[in-house]
Amino acid sequence: MAGVLRIVLGDQCSAGLSALRDLDPAQDVVLLSEVMGECTYVKHHPKKIVLVLSAMRHFARALEERGVRVDYIRLDDPENTGSLRGEMLRAVARHRPNAVVATETGEYRLTEDMRHWHEASGVETDIRDDDRFLCRIQEFRAWARDRGAFRMEFFYRDMRRRHGLLMDGDGPAGGKWNYDPENRKPLPRSMAPPPVPRFEPDDITRDVMALVARMFPDHFGAVDGFALPVTHHDAAAALKDFVTTRLPLFGDWQDTMKTGESTMYHALVSTSLNTGLLSPLEVCQAAEAAWRAGLAPLNAVEGFVRQILGWREFVRGVYWLKMPEYASLNSLGAQRPLPGFYWNGETQMNCLHQAIADTRRNAYAHHIQRLMITGNFALLAGLDPTEVDEWYLIVFADAYEWVEMPNVRGMALHADGGIMGSKPYASSGAYINRMSDYCKKCHYDVKIAVGEKACPFNALYWDFIARHSERFGQNPRMAMPVRTLSKMDPARVTAIRERAAGFLAAMDLGGAV
Ligand SMILES: Cc1cc2nc3c(=O)[nH]c(=O)nc-3n(C[C@H](O)[C@H](O)[C@H](O)COP(=O)(O)OP(=O)(O)OC[C@H]3O[C@@H](n4cnc5c(N)ncnc54)[C@H](O)[C@@H]3O)c2cc1C
Ligand code: SF4
């Protein structure tokens, strides 16, 4: 073969991928490999494996329909080496290309490996930027260079200006950059979010589901009920449905949680964005167009665009700026092992029980379940960040290290010492009670902090503030709870801390908590 071997990874199912640019269908071959190493380096939720393999198979078919030569390696191919490097080397031996072209990966581990592909194969290798993101890694480095502390809000404003999103001339649409003060209302008495569209599996997806069910029976969760989009066409239909039915109320209810409603008014687009089925720009533009057409209010649209243009790009920038050190940061010295109920959901704390059940069923939980239920508990209980990181990487269909790790280690656990956020997202049961209906059906009483029936989040919250009071006393955004604690009756503080210690001891012993 005189052409180029072009490598496409499972989260790179995008027609405009840099590795496919300048493709010559007459000469080149595109390699897609399903490899065991990527399915098992952590035991991913089976629905995530189905999503990625099915998206790859559909993408390969779409390329073939355009006349492109595709070399597709299936997971159960007996010759499959089980690694991306091994499959690249086999393909080089089969096709004898002039060059190998790939797009940089989303994980430090794989990117490091790719750097050595040239030596391993003896063929010129071109690793291209992943320009599906709106901020290149070099651009983020330049933005971060002169800043002591990075704040997402300022990054986001620059991104709005640079991409002309939600702008009126040189200023922000509507006159304000951020409409959060109008968002995040508590859960009303009755609420019925619209149903989320389901994409019933076709023959390709059904084959993948059978394969995954057979090969990964011991992973957390099951393939049953898989209904996520696996093609650009279906992902675009899901986006359209969100924009017309849920986006108008996204701002108001984005922090609320309700039993049995895991999506609420969220978009459910992260799986499509992270596998490359949708581009961040098309998602933001669809939201902006809805506002300009008068179909969704500005507070909702700005809040939504900020998640993608702001947070998503910001966490990626932080990941690449701070790796590999980031993966071992543990600024609060948290060391407790992950309790078993994170896997089986068997806890009397109804909020955790519901969030973990949603996660196991759907490989999805919305942002506030991730941050203020499973994340908040891990923060308050001092769970080991490496174990928590791994749990999040396993359980969600949208989990890739570049986005999972800064969210978990940084935003949820504050283990990065404040790179991701100036204060920890710690809260007692009161927040969960305001934003959800979970407390109504809980074994524990959210109104009390002491005694066997007291909501564990209450005692753990004050215990957390007490454990770190010296550190947080220096932080203006945490000074208030530290002051409140210092004014509490010392006997009450002792009782609260004893309740926290008793609860944690029972949890560590695997007792029913
Ligand atoms: C502890 C924790 C772990 C997380 N792990 C992941 C992960 O592994 N993969 C992942 O894609 N997101 C992760 N997030 C971010 C966010 O929770 C998910 O992107 C979101 O819940 C996906 O659902 P959605 O598409 O309905 O999002 P929506 O709430 O509708 O938001 C729209 C989009 O904005 C982007 N977004 C929103 N918040 C963030 C954020 N904090 N960081 C990055 N992108 C964001 C996502 O692409 C999302 O699809 C995590 C958040 C926390 C607190
Ligand atoms: S009472 Fe406490 S443990 Fe129970 S659901 Fe509410 S916050 Fe969670």
Image (spheres, helix red, strand yellow):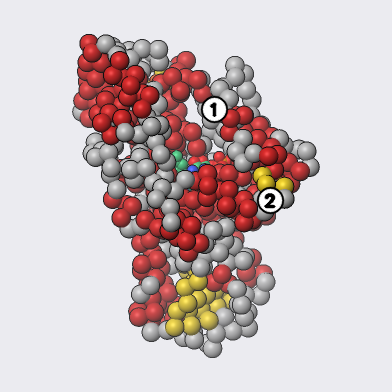
Q: Secondary structure at mark 1?
A: loop
Identify which residue is drawn at 24% across, 19% down: 497
User: Disc 1 marks which residue?
Assistant: 256
Q: Is residue 400 visible?
A: no
Residue drawn 50% across and 37% down? Answer: 367
What kind of residue is marked 1? Answer: Thr
Quadrant (top left/top right/bottom left/bottom right) for the C terminus: top left
Q: Nearer the viewer, residue 203 or 358?
A: 358
Between the C-alphas of marks 1 and 2, the distance is 34 Å
**Image point 62% across, 35% down: which residue?**
179
Residue 307 as seen in the image, left or right of residue 445 = right
Above-or-below relation of 4 to 170: below
**Which of the labelled discs sits on residue 170, or is there none?**
2
Q: Is residue 329 left or right of residue 425?
A: left
Nearer-N-terminus badge (1/2): 2
Q: Which x, y percent locates residue 265? A: 61, 34
Q: Specify the label residue 319 is tagged with.
A: none
Q: Quadrant of residue 322?
A: bottom left
> For the residue labelled by badge 2, is the local secondary structure a helix, a strand or a loop?
loop
Compared with 473, 140 (above or below) is: below
Q: Is residue 421 left or right of residue 494?
A: right
Callout 2 amino acid? Asp
The x, y position of residue 323, in whole percent, is 35, 57
Mark 2 and ligand 1: say if the CB distance to the nearest ligand atom is below 8 Å.
no
Tell me which residue sits at (61%, 45%) in the image.
305
Residue 36 in picture, x, y percent from top left: 38, 61
Between disc 1 and disc 2, the foreground one is 2
